[in-house]
Image (tube, grey):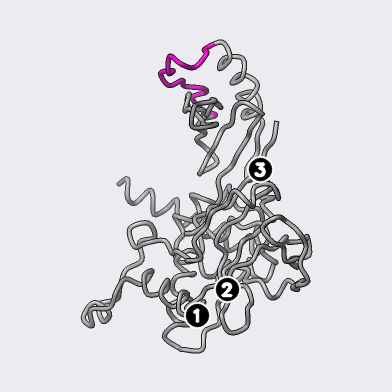
Amino acid sequence: MKAYAKRLHNPFNGAVQVVASEQIRALSYNGLEWELQFQCHTPRGIQYARIGRWTKRNGFRPYPLDPSIERDAVESAYRPLVTALETTAVPLPQDDHYEFWLLDEKHRQPLALLASCRLASEMPQTSIHPIWKALNASQLDLYNTPEEERRGAPPPSYRLEQNVKQRAGQNPQTRWFLRAADGSGQALNTAAEVLDAHLPADYFPPLLLRETWDNPAEQALCERYLQRLSPHLLMLQGLSLESRDRVEQMASQYAQEVAASFHLYPAVADPQRMTALRVEARLRDACLKD
């Protein structure tokens, strides 16, 4: 039984938790509710059929099964998976170390992460347009200020996307890297063959997007977006203690989101701060119920 977490990219939105065997898998986006999917061979190739949901409180709740799926095969496959879920502790390890980066036009250095995968064999299967995407306003609850509305400015996420697109240039370049335990990256081609370039860890933006911009307005917009994304960024497992402390400070305005995702955070830089945020979240929730 494999157990791992894979980051959700383009736009980045946390990580999906996965527990899987050869024939069946369970996916969770919040670490609490799991959807079970059974592998099926179809004329269009291998696909997964949704067969039920599992939670620690309610156990397994099956969905109506497609008549084309062999019921005995499903029942023999899901029981070991449910047993594994009962003892699974999240967050699961993020081991998607093969990373596909959009490069900065001027310096040809990592600008924004577009995708990642766990195995070299998955790299050729990854078809990705060299365009970085941000979470939109409805997904992130990030809107224009009254002044920006008065000026008729486009939504913040769209403007940030355009800034990244401009920085990548007219002919955007991309590169696969295999990230090492120390954060450095070895450049690869799509066949997973090693290239000459080997970049130290500080060449890779820890928050998956380059944070330094020449234009003050572009800099402020990037900071604003990453601050709003910070409760999700705390799910990243490769953050240094310094970066994690910085992101926790950024997330201090979003106590309820931090509390909701806290069980998916792999580490804590300032336990006192995080405890205070979780207490604040409980108080806010109590006020809303009243």
First in sequence: mark 1 vs mark 2: 2
Q: How far is mark 1 from mark 3, CA to CA? A: 33 Å
Q: Position of residue 113 (x, y in %)?
A: 57, 64
**Residue 68, magenta (yes or no):** yes
Query: Which residue is the site of mark 3?
Result: 4
Residue at the top extreme? 72
Kind of residue at disc 1: Arg
**Residue 290, magenta (yes or no):** no
* Secondary element at tag 2: strand
- At horizontal 61% and vertical 55% (from top left) the residue drawn is 116
Tags 1 and 3 touching, CB below 8 Å: no
First in sequence: mark 2 vs mark 3: 3
Query: Which residue is the site of mark 1?
Result: 167
259 horizontally vs 82: left or right: left
First in sequence: mark 1 vs mark 3: 3
Is the stretch drawn in magenta largely helix, strand or loop? loop
Query: Which residue is the site of mark 2?
Result: 111
Kind of residue at disc 3: Tyr
* Secondary element at tag 1: helix
Q: Residues within 10 Å of mark 1 (few under 14, many from 20)?
A: some
Looking at the image, is mark 2 or mark 3 nearer the viewer? 2
Tags 1 and 2 touching, CB below 8 Å: yes
Please, is residue 261 above or below residue 216 in the view? Answer: above
Please, is residue 172 above or below residue 258 in the view? Answer: below
Magenta range is 56-71
Q: Position of residue 99 (x, y in %)?
A: 64, 59
